[in-house]
């Protein structure tokens, strides 16, 4: 906590990928590094917020000066976010697995010599962003999601904002040619009820600082 415009405010940030077990040694994951979520948590901390950082197994270290809650699965992430409430804002920057393995094995799966591959059944994971956005009691004043899109970025992200009932969607174009996924820069469009605002391509740290300032302003905390 510092003495910036977010002093006394509590912000929960989700970040990184989730890991969904197949058996005790194998899992399904994705390539999220956690870089943008980590930068955002740092920027919010620097504005004085108390930050709870709920992170999957990311490839960048979590920032100092925040409360770090390490989880692996989407369901653990949802539980951790709910446990962290109440909050003034929840920012869902994690790349959550949409599906988990419904028939995960309690012991290591082995080849049985038949040459037949095992079949995995999938079950849908809870949507953390949509769940928090639709809380009937104690909904945070500001709920923000991210949308990584490869085409029609604004149209898809606008639909996503309405479907998930969050306040803002931070949309970005992750076509491989942009080099954004896993890179150090991001080009985002901030989508709210009032429209879409395209930001220039900036280092992820600067995108984070810009978003943190906007979050502070939205919470009526100046900044
Ligand atoms: O639908 P899509 O996965 O593209 O939505 C992305 C946004 O939703 C991100 O903010 C992500 O953190 C959030 N999300 C979530 N829980 C899920 C899936 C996505 O919080 N199960």
Image (tube, grey):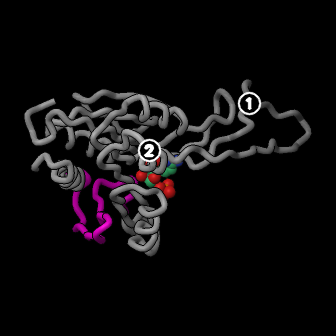
Label 1 packing within 10 angstroms: few (<14), some (14-19), many (20+): some
Mark 2 vs mark 1, foreground winner is 2
Q: CA distance from mark 2 to mark 1?
A: 33 Å
> At which x and y percent is residue 46?
15, 38
Looking at the image, can residue 175 be seen?
Answer: no
Given contact means CB atoms under 8 Å apart, are the residues at marks 2 and 1 in contact? no
Assign the N terminus to one quadrant of the image.
top left
Point 63% across, 42% down: residue: 100
In the image, is 17 to the left or to the right of 209? right
In the image, is 107 to the left or to the right of 55? right
> At which x and y percent is residue 153?
41, 71
> At which x and y percent is residue 81?
42, 35
Find residue 105 and name its label. Answer: 1
Find residue 135 and name its label. Answer: 2
Which of the 4 image quarters holds residue 15?
A: top left
| Magenta-colored span | 179-205
View extreme (left): residue: 3
Point 23% across, 32% down: residue: 50
Q: Is residue 155 above or below residue 13?
A: below
Q: Secondary structure at mark 1?
A: loop
Q: Is residue 115 above or below residue 79?
A: below
Is residue 200 within the magenta segment? yes
Q: Is residue 210 above or below residue 155?
A: above
Is residue 101 within the magenta segment? no
In the image, is 80 to the left or to the right of 204? right
Q: Secondary structure at mark 2?
A: loop
Looking at the image, can residue 42 be seen?
Answer: yes
Residue situated in front as seen by the camera: 63 or 218: 218
**Mark 2 lies within 8 Å of ligand 1 (Cβ measured):** no
């Amino acid at each position: 906590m510092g003495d910036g415009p977010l002093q006394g405010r509590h912000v929960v940030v989700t970040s990184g990928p989730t890991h969904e077990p197949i058996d005790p040694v194998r899992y399904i994951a994705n390539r999220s590094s956690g870089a943008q979520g980590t930068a955002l948590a740092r920027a919010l901390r620097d504005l004085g917020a108390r930050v709870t950082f709920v992170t999957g197994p990311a490839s960048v270290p979590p920032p100092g000066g925040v409360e770090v809650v390490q989880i692996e699965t989407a369901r653990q992430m949802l539980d951790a976010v709910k446990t962290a409430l109440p909050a003034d804002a929840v920012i869902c920057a994690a790349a959550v697995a949409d599906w988990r393995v419904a028939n995960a094995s309690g012991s290591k799966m082995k080849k049985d010599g038949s040459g037949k591959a095992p079949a995995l059944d999938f079950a849908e994971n809870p949507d953390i962003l949509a769940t928090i956005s639709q809380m009937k009691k104690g909904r945070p004043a500001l709920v923000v999601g991210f949308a990584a899109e490869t085409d029609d970025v604004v149209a898809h992200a606008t639909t996503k904002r309405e479907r998930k009932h969050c306040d803002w969607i931070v949309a970005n174009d992750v076509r491989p040619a942009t080099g954004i996924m896993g890179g150090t820069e991001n080009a985002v469009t901030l989508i709210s009820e009032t429209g879409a605002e395209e930001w220039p391509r900036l280092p992820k740290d600067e995108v984070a600082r810009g978003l943190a300032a906007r979050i502070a302003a939205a919470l009526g905390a100046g900044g």
